[in-house]
Amino acid sequence: MTDPIADYLTRLRNAVAAKHRIVEIPASNIKKNITKVLFEKGYILNFKFDDTTNAGQGSIKIALKYHPITKEPAIRELVRVSKPGLRKYASTDTMPRVINGLGIAILTTSKGVITDKEARKLNVGGEVLCYIS
């Protein structure tokens, strides 16, 4: 697999499109950190790191979040920005705003995997992994 983060986002996107409740994804440290950010910002209901399954790093079980009445998913759009062939970096001056602040951009910085708002607050730049709205 060339791009594991794109695979992670695609599995989430497909599970949301198929209205699944739970999706299981092979784990890595960066995927675990992205999952924690999604949970903190309210885009997923819950998650569980299962280290007993594969011989590698295990898997991540993610419970997707839907509106209780309208059944609309909390995650409407997932877009991969920085790719292995073309990395995209942003400084604090050029930090992206997703849907004028209604969505989030997930960055990997020297302070860890954080959102664009936290990066502005900490005054750090980094690689823009994805946009979520």
Image (tube, rainbow, N blue to C red):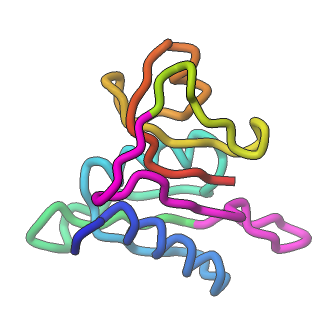
Question: Which residue is nearer to you in this view: 118 or 3?
Answer: 3
Residue at 60% from the left image edge and 81% from the top image edge: 20
- Residue at image location 45% in from the left, 42% down from the top: 128
For the point 36% across and 57% down, which residue is it?
83
Q: Is residue 68 left or right of residue 16?
A: right
Residue at the limit of the structure toward the front, as seen here? 86
Quadrant for the N terminus in the image: bottom left
Of all residues, the one furthest to the bottom in this rendering is: 18
Count of numbered tags: 0
User: Which x, y percent locates residue 35?
Assistant: 45, 51
Task: Tell me, yes or no, whether the highlighted magenta stretch contains residue 103.
Answer: no
Name the residue: 43% across, 24% down: 125
Viewer-proximal residue among 114 and 86: 86
Judging depth in this view, the residue of 13 and 55 nearest the camera is 13
Is residue 83 highlighted in magenta? yes
Q: Residue furthest left?
A: 55
Image quadrant where one finds the C terminus? bottom right
Q: In the rendered image, which quarter is residue 78 located in?
A: bottom right
* 132 to 110, vertically: above or below: below
Please provide percent x and percent y for residue 64: 61, 66
Horizontal side of 121 relative to 112 (left or right) equals right
Seen in the image, is 113 located left or right of residue 68? left
Q: Position of residue 86 (x, y in %)?
A: 34, 54
Q: Main secondary structure of the magenta part?
A: loop
Q: Position of residue 46 (x, y in %)?
A: 54, 56
Span of residues in magenta: 64-89
**With respect to residue 49, does 11 lie above or below?**
below
